[in-house]
Amino acid sequence: MTFRAQVALALAIGAIVPVGVLGLGLRREMTARLEDQTARRIAALAGVLGADVAAQAADVRTRLRTLAAGLASDTRFRLAVRGDGADRRWLLDWAGEAMAVSGLAALRVEDDTGLILSSGHFRNEFGRRDPGPSAAVAAAPERAALVRFRTPDADLLALTSSDSFSVGGRRYRVLGGTAFDAARAAALVPRDEMAVSLVLGASGADSTGIAALQLPYYDGVAGMEGRVARLVVTPNPEPLIALRRSVDRRLAAAAGLTLLLIALLTLILASRVSRPLAELADKTSRVDLDRLDVDFSSERGDEIGALGNLLAGMTARIRASTVRLLEAERRAATGDLARQINHDVKNGLAPIRHVLRHLSETAAGHPDQLATIFRERRATLESSLTYLEDLARNYARLAPVPDARPSDLGALLRDVARAVEAEGVELVVQVADALPPVRADGVVLRRIVENLTRNAVDALEGKPGRVTLASEPVRDGPEPRVRLAVSDTGRGMTQEELDRAFADFHTTKPAGTGLGLSVVRRLVGDLGGRLRVETAPGSGSTFTVEIPSA
C-alpha cells in the first residue's frame, strides 16, 4: 500500500467510524422499537385468533352434545347396535343425515374400542376400527384437535371434538367437527401488515413469525399422531425494510460526502509528502548487485533526508560486502567440488588398491600363481579404470549431460561385489531372472551402487557380517521399474541418525567425507527414481532404490 493510500485510509477511518457508529446506532434503535411494536400487535392478534378458534370448538361441542343426547334416547340406535337388520341400515345412514342437519363437515359414531358404526363424511368406512382421532381429541387440553379425515373426494381438515353417551351399559362416542379454513383466520388480521399461515405437523415454532395458536393434530389419512398444528402470524417486513433503506441512503450520502472531502485533503497532503519518497523509491529500484553506484545522499534536514543518507551508507557497505561474498562463494564452490571429486576418486581407487595388495601378497607367497590371480582380477582393474576415466570425463564438463542408455543392473551388482572387498564381510548378490535393463547413465548408476555398498560395509564397523545386493522387477505401477536393495547386518540407525544421514558433509566415520548418501539421494532424483530406508537399532539397514526400466 502506498504512503498516499495509507494517509487516505487513516483519514477515512477517523471520519467514517464516528459517522458509521452514529448511523448504525440510530438504525438499531428504530429497528428495535418497530420490532417491539410489531410483537405487541402480534400478541393481540394471537388472542383474537385463539378466541375465534375456542368459539368454533365450543360450537362443535354443543352440536355434538345434542346429537349424542338424541342417540342415547333413540330406540332404533339400541336395536341397531344389537344387530337388527333394518335398524342397522338406519344407523349407517344416520351420520350423513345428522351431519347435514347439524352443519358439521365430518361426523361419525363409534364404540369405546374405536369401531366405526356410522360415518357421514365417508359412508364406506363403517366397520373399520380407528381410535386415533378420538384419542387425539381426548388428550387435547380443550378436548378439541385438528384431524385430517378421508372422504370420497378429497381429504378434509376439521376442527374436531367428541361427546360420549351410554346405551345398554356400553359407552359410545359421537366424533365430528367443522371444516377448518386457514383463510378465515387470515381474514382476522390486516393483510397489508400481517399474514397468517397454517403449519401442520411442525416440531417447533416458525422462526419467521410467532406461533399464535397451537392445537393437537392427528393425520387420519397417514395415521400420524403426536403432532401439533400451529397458526403462525408473520409480520410484513416491508415497512421495516423501507425505513432501513431510507436510513441506509442517508448514511451512504453522508459517507460519500466524507470520502470526497478526505480525497481532496489526501491529495493536498500527499503531494507535499510523497514526492520526495517517490524519488527515493525510484533510486532504490535502480539498485542491484551489478549497480551499486546510486547516490542517495541528501541535504534535507528532515526525516526523509536522514533516510536518504542512511541508504547512501548502506549501499557503500553493500558494495564492500559484495566483493567479499563473491570471493567466499567461489572458494566454497571450489571446496565442495574438490570434496566430491575426492570422494568419488577414492571409491574408484579402492578396488585397484585391493587388487594390487592381493597381487603383492601372491607374488611374495605364491609367485607361481601370480599369472592366474592376475587373469582373475584383471576384470576388476579394467572396470575400475574405466569408471575413473568416465568419471574424469564427467567432471571435465561443469554440467555433464547424462547418457541414459539401457544399463544391465545385474552385471553391475556382480562387478561392484567383486570390486568391494572387506575382511570378514560376506557379499551376496541376488539378481532376479529376466531382469530388464534400467534407463540410467552407467557412471551414475555405478556411483549409486558403490556408495550404498561401501556404506553398508562401513556399517559393519569391521565386524563379520553380510551385505546383500538384490534386484528385481516391479510391475505394480503405471510405469515399469527395477528395484535395487542394499542390506547389511550392522548396528542400524536411530531415528535421529536417520534424520541426518542424507545431510551434506554429515558423517560418523573418522575419515569420511559425509557425501556418500547425499550424492546417492541427488543421483537417484536425477534418474527419476525413488529412495527409501528401513532401519532400526540392532537390526541393520536396507536402502531401496526404484529406477524406471528401459
Image (tube, rainbow, N blue to C red):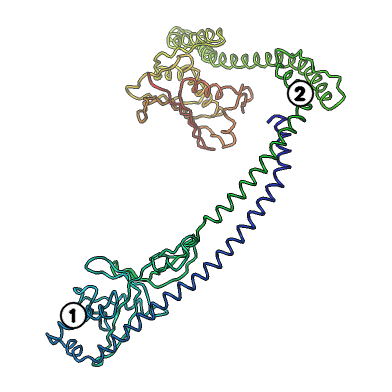
Q: Position of residue 471 (x, y in %)?
A: 40, 25
Q: Looking at numbered disc 1 in the image, what kind of residue is underneath it? A: Leu
| Up/down of 460 relative to 538, above or below | above
| Up/down of 274 relative to 539, above or below | above
The answer to which of 92 and 389 lies nearer the viewer is 92
> Residue at 51% across / 27% down in the picture?
456
The answer to which of 335 and 327 lies nearer the viewer is 327
**Label disc, if present, on residue 481 of the rendered structure:** none
Instruction: Give the quadrant of the C terminus.
Output: top left
The answer to which of 346 and 63 lies nearer the viewer is 63
Instruction: Give the quadrant of the N terminus.
Output: top right
Q: Position of residue 278 (x, y in %)?
A: 74, 22
- Tell me which corner region of the image, top left, top right, bottom left or bottom right, holds residue 501: top right
Mark 2 — residue?
275
> Residue at 70% across / 19% down in the picture?
285
Q: Position of residue 358 (x, y in %)?
A: 51, 13
State left or right for residue 162 relative to residue 53: left
| Up/down of 246 relative to 76, above or below | above
> Residue at 81% across / 23% down in the picture?
310
Mark 1 — residue?
92
Q: Mark 2: which secondary structure?
A: helix
Q: Residue furthest left?
A: 85
